[in-house]
Image (cartoon, grey):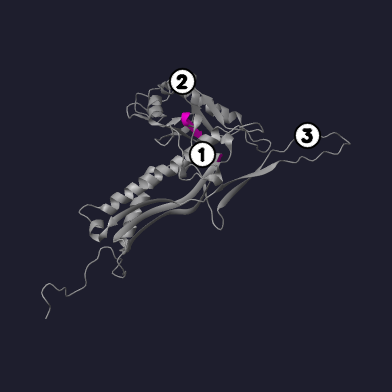
Amino acid sequence: MAILGQPTGDLSNSGHRLGNDTGTVNPLHIEEYSGEVETQISKSSFMRDYVRIKPVRGTDTVTNDRMGKTSLQAVTPGVRPTSSAPEFDNISVKVDTIVLARSNVHLLADFQAHYDVRAEIGQDHGKEIAKFFDEAFIIQVIKSALIVVGTGAGEKPAPDGFVGGTRVELAAANDELDPDKLQRAIEDVCQGIEENDVDLDGGVILLAPAQYYALLRNDKLVSAEYSMGNGNYANGMVLRSNGLRIVKTNRIPNATISGHYLSNAGNNSAYDVAGEETDAVAIVMLPKALLAGETIPLTSKVYYHDVELQWFIDSYLAFGVTPNRAEHAGVVLKYRA
């Protein structure tokens, strides 16, 4: 005879897969959390759409070999042509830091509260990781655009044929809020990139919201009528400028960044931001502007620790990014007195 209150059959557990899983951590609950993180990152992060990220395995460094241009010569009858020796070098980026989002929740009862805690935490982890990921890439795009190639002070050596980035500084304070002046500056950046013999195909223009809405007031870019051109004022959007897609983002740094999580002595604090790097108001980026590597792709875990009587909810990844081809990047800088 069954005891009152004693279940006579199997308990239902929505967190177990086909009833075959065991253990205190429910596998489907983990997948649910991880899915929330990945969904949020897919929705919030955009840099993966424009930069190829190489897997880094068996080493902590990804390297890109670079070769300079060869020289042409006129052939004189009876004279042996000379050999042209192009210059070689390489550029590399090291992946040496794990970036972690962690939340602790006491006991399973709190983890399965009256609202969906896993979903809320997953969305927040995804949002913060996406913001951090994109910001690191944007920092390096700005640095790439500001590179001056040469052997002088503050310049970077490169093989013959490589040139620096394209920079345009606005002429007066608040010009970045003037739709015509801002658009002209973006055009000047695109012109400078093309004059370096770089095709703009596959590029993107990154704008902070203030600059995006400034361009929205430029009647050369938008139409008051409904159309599928560059954009339209009726829908409040700008789609393209100079044939390049426009992406609106809050992740362009406008203040000094010191002690960035990816900065260390080994990379000479490469991800910190200072000086004119904080003045960027518009960025033009092409895919070859950056070299990026990833050792640990986005990973999510949920686990319980008996000693601390709490759940650990983690999301982490390890990546690195650095300027690659400076001539594939350009930046508009606000006026600095």
> Is 173 positioned to the left or the right of 308 in the image?
right
Q: Give the quadrant of the N terminus.
A: bottom left
Read off the residue under disc 1.
140
Residue 277, percent from left and from top = 50, 32
Label 3, label 1: how far apart the Cα atoms are: 38 Å
Q: Give the range drawn in magenta.
A: 278-288
Q: Which residue is drawn at 22% across and 52% down?
A: 115
If you read the primary sequence from the N terminus, does the residue marked by circle 3 or circle 1 appear first? 3
Give the quarter of the image for residue 160. top right
Callout 1, which amino acid?
A: Gln
> Is 326 positioned to the left or the right of 84 in the image?
left
> Is 101 positioned to the left or the right of 161 in the image?
left
Q: Does the magenta stretch include residue 61?
A: no
Determine crowd level at label 2: few under 14, some 14-19, many 20+ residues with C-alpha closer than 10 A: some
Is residue 102 in sight in this rendering? yes
Read off the residue under disc 3.
73
Give the quarter of the image for residue 290. top right
